[in-house]
Every structure is written in structure tokens, then in C-alpha cells.
Amino acid sequence: MKTKTLLLFVVFSLLLLACHKNDDESECINPRTVIFFFPYSADMTLFFKRNINDIETAVQNGAFAHERLVVCISSTKNRADIIELRDNRRDTLFYYDNPDFTQSAALTQMLSDIITAVPAEKYSLVAGGHGTAWVPKDVKTLSKSFGGFYTKTGIENIAEAIRNAGIKMQYILFDGCFMSNVETVYALRNAADYIIGCPTEIMIKGIPYQSCAKFISGEEPDYGGFCRAFCDYYETFDTPCGTIAVTCSSELEALVEVMREINKVHPFDASILNDVQRLDGYKTPVFYDLGDYAAHLCKDEVLLTSFNAQLSRAVPYKAHTEYFFSEQSGKIKINAYSGLSVSPLTEENVKLGVEETEWWKATR
């Protein structure tokens, strides 16, 4: 018995030494690591840097007390720095020369390197940049899919990169336009437990981290509190426009099943779109409110009730101001809001390739 006790004591002591090499450096696997991804975008770099300052302010105010925060930021086209925010300082962990974040392989490498450098039990991803949801990155009429002017990447590449890195995010927060879109979240359903984003355009300020970050830190994020804080901020903004929603990935397959039933008995009729809530300001709309679209398409009250119930489970948290803002069209009134947009089979969306999305295929 004494031999076993001594052995256990030695093993325990070695574990303590492994976890505490010195006061400044810990090699224990921490509970959570949050990865902030800011790819190069000439027009947004200044705002990304402001976002980082806001995140640091949030930390000083008590947010992310038990997380390690890692930032990947490309201030130029030719370099991406991987920085850890900790103890009121910024430590550069490593950097990449000429990273090509338009490809899933580079994204996988970045995630894998961070996982190695900052191991955790859970990971979350906050991605900042321009966004147009599922729309392919090489489409010129709409500015980009997600990323910056030089780092546009398809949603499928993000999903593949996370899968190939061997993880699943606790949440993905998109700090960009249009990303709370059903075609998009369905494509990412296996990449994260929850997906947070805006179904409309977001102001260039982006997520107000200084007031919202505390709600997505901790073991169990307060997604409802996050949505409320987001809209509270934008209610008093110079242009008081904002939309936000949280999608629960595990509820999306059931939503697909009900949508498939609706599509079977109610063929698409483009004329209904004149009365459906639009969620963009394009001359020819691409994004419409999913709940309002189903309400106009489905004439079966029982089936529609089933759809709405499942949509509420799939989007358990959402909030919006009275108007959303469009760079092209200005302020647009919100009369119906489910938290997710959808791209119906219009001539414009067919041209953009909506029939190639997983959501479209799964719901037919």
C-alpha cells in the first residue's frame, strides 16, 4: 500500500509540474479557446483593429475569464499574425507569409496550428468580414461569399476546414452581413452547435463586443442575452438598425423535413414574393425572411403550424430593431422576422446557383 501511495504522489506531482512550468505559462488544456478570424480586407482592417480593442475592453470588464483568446489577423495581403490576448498584452504565437485563406487547406492549417498551440476542451470561432451567405465567392454581381476583398471563401470551405481540423465549434459567430441564412447554416450544421449571425446587412461597426462579449463567454453562453445586448446597442446607434439570430444546428434536419413536405404540396409561386419580407436592399432581392416565405407559400394551416414550431426550435434566440439598413436602399421596415433568411428559386437565385446548395437539395 505504501508503494502505491508513493507512486500516486509522484504521478500527481509530475502532473502539477507539467501544468505549471512557471507563473506566466500554463500548458494545461484549458476549458475553452475562442478563435477570432479577421482575414485581409483593405476597407475593414481599421475596424478589425477596433474590434480587437473592444474585445480587450470586454475582457477587462470580466468577459472570457476562463477562455484563452487567439486572434488571426491579416493586416496586409502578405502576412497573417496569430496573436494571443492575455494578461493585458498581445503575444504573437506565430505568423504566416502569404496565406491563402480562400482555400480550405490554409484554413485547416491555421485551425490545426492554433489547436496545437492553445489546446482546449471546446473551441468557438468568431469570423469577421464581408458576407453574402451561400452566394459563390466568384460571383461578381454580389461582392463576396465571406471574407475580404482578397480573401473570399465559400461556406463549404469553412465547413471542410473545421471538419478536417478534427473539431466541432461550440458556436460560430459571423461578424458580417447576411450570414444568418438557412442555406448557410445548414451547410455548417456539422461544424458548430450554434451559429450566430445577422440575416441582413450589419453596420461597419460590427458586433459591439464591449457590451455583447460577456454573454458568449463561460461554459454555457447566454445567447438570449447576447441578442438583447446587440439590439440594445443598435437601438441607440447613429443609424438605429440591427438584426441578430442564433441557430441551433441540431434542429435543422427536422426543419428540413417539414420544409420538404411544404414543397411537395405547394409548388413555388414567384408572385408571392411581392408580399414576403425582404431582407436585403438589392434591386433584385436574393434574401427573404424564411418564416414569412413559408407563411405565404403554405396554405395548409396544420403543416404551417408544424413548420413554425420547428423554426422556433431551430432559431431559439433572435432580436431586431424596427428597421434594417441596406447600403443600396437605406432603411427598410421589418414587418416579419424569423431570424433566418432564405433564397427562393427566383431567376436571379437560379443564376447564382441556389439549386447547388445543400438546403435546396435536402428540401426537395
Image (cartoon, rainbow, N blue to C red):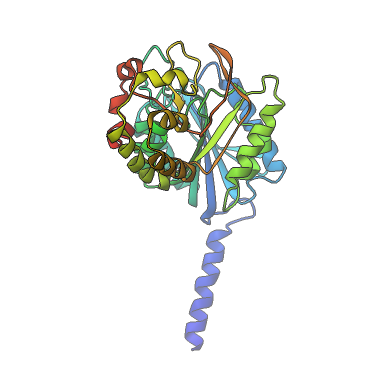
Q: Image height check: is 81 above or below 35?
A: above
Residue 364 x/y as whole percent: 27, 34
Residue 298 x/y as whole percent: 38, 33
Q: Which residue is drawn at 49% across and 28% down?
A: 80
Residue 330 x/y as whole percent: 59, 13
Along the line of sight, the residue nearer the viewer: 5 or 75? 75
Q: Is residue 190 visible to us here?
A: no
In the rendered view, does 207 fall on the left or right side of 100? Answer: right
Along the line of sight, the residue nearer the viewer: 59 or 145? 145
Q: Residue at x 55, y 70 (%)?
A: 13
Along the line of sight, the residue nearer the viewer: 347 or 89? 347
Q: Please tell me in which quadrant of the rendered image residue 46 appears.
A: top right
Residue 313 x/y as whole percent: 47, 46
Q: Which residue is drawn at 38% across and 27% down?
A: 134
Q: Please tell me in which quadrant of the rendered image residue 252 appears.
A: top left
Number of callouts = 0
In the rendered view, does 11 fall on the left or right side of 319? Answer: left
Q: Is residue 278 visible to us here?
A: yes
Q: Residue furthest bottom?
A: 1
